[in-house]
């Protein structure tokens, strides 16, 4: 059972986005998978123009 | 699944059987007995016919006793209302429940105007490199206003965060 899937790691980048790596599914509000993971960067400053992903806007 | 519900798969689709809804209209057993035969076990044999015939017949079920979906999730997005018994049109809850095996998959739900809601196990790595394990449901701030970062504290409402 264990080891088949890589447990996702959500890394909090200081003053930056969330980095998500491992096996996960990203779901849009309608619950359809947007992406099934290996690695994504998710906006957590609220300013990205390509939400839910980070576009570097937190630096501005 | 509970209450005797079953699902049957071929390579392309999954058919869901919800016995509590069956009104014995017999659309399935009359039209495609090679697949739907209540005298046999399992009573649904996906190998008895091809995918398009199975879809045709499942769509004729007058209730939600038989429903279906594509196994390729991206194709489910394209399905329209003409497929009356696609789970999207009959049993929307299955879209949520069944896309994911809770034991296997961690899902990150992106809430409109709200946080990321993580369901399932994950490791949270802090700025200092320490890691802690979480399971269940955890909401992570994505509006930038939470006082409990990285967690959501509901501040997205007070700042009127718009995610679109």
Image (cartoon, rainbow, N blue to C red):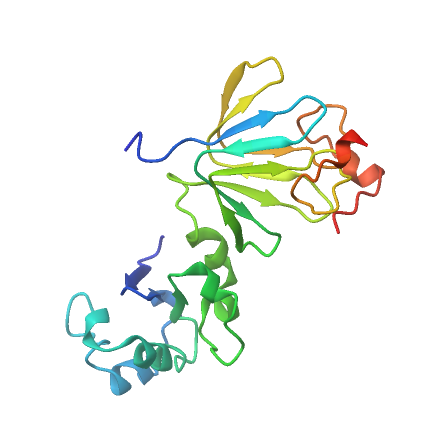
Tell me where residue B15 sits by quadrant: bottom left
Say which of A52 and B147 sits in front.
A52
B69 to A28, vertically: above or below? below
Of B72 and B159, which appears nearest the observer?
B72
Q: Is residue B6 visible?
A: yes
Is A25 on the left or on the right of B45, as rendered?
Answer: right
- Residue reaching furthest to the right: B159
Count of number-bearing discs = 0
Instruction: Tell me where residue A44 appears, x and y as whole percent.
Output: 70, 34
Residue shown at the point (72%, 30%) measured from the top left? B153
Query: In the drawing, does residue B15 fall left or right of residue B87?
Result: left
Give the farthest residue toward the bottom: B31
Q: Residue at x 46, y 39 (%)?
A: A38
Does residue B45 appear in the picture of this structure? Answer: no
Relative placement, left or right, of B83 versus B31 is: right
- Quadrant in the rendering for residue A17: top right
> Which residue is nearer to you in this view: B147 or B64?
B147
Where is residue B113 shown, x and y percent of the image?
74, 46
Where is residue B61? Give x, y as percent.
39, 79
- Quarter of the view holding residue B145: top right
Residue drawn 78% across and 34% down?
A: B155
Q: Position of residue B62 (x, y in %)?
A: 43, 80
């Amino acid at each position: 059972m264990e080891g088949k899937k890589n447990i996702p790691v959500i890394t909090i980048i200081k003053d930056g986005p969330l980095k998500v790596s491992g096996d996960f599914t990203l779901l849009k509000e309608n619950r359809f998978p947007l992406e099934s993971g290996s690695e994504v960067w998710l906006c957590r400053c609220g300013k990205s123009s390509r939400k839910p992903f980070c576009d570097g806007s937190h630096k501005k | 699944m509970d209450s005797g519900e079953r699902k049957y798969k071929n390579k392309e689709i999954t058919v869901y059987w919800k016995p509590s809804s069956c009104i014995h209209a017999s659309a399935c057993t009359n039209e495609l007995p090679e697949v739907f035969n209540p005298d046999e076990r399992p009573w649904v044999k996906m190998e008895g016919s091809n995918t398009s015939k199975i879809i045709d017949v499942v769509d004729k079920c007058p209730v939600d006793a038989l429903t279906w979906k594509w196994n390729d999730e991206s194709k489910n997005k394209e399905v329209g209302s003409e497929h009356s018994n696609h789970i999207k049109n009959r049993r929307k809850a299955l879209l949520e429940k069944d896309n994911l095996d809770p034991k296997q998959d961690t899902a990150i739900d992106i809430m409109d105007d709200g946080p990321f809601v993580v369901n399932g196990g994950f490791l949270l790595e802090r700025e200092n490199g320490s890691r802690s394990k979480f399971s269940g449901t955890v909401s992570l701030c994505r509006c930038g206003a939470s006082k409990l970062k990285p967690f959501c504290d509901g501040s997205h409402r007070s700042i009127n965060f718009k995610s679109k």
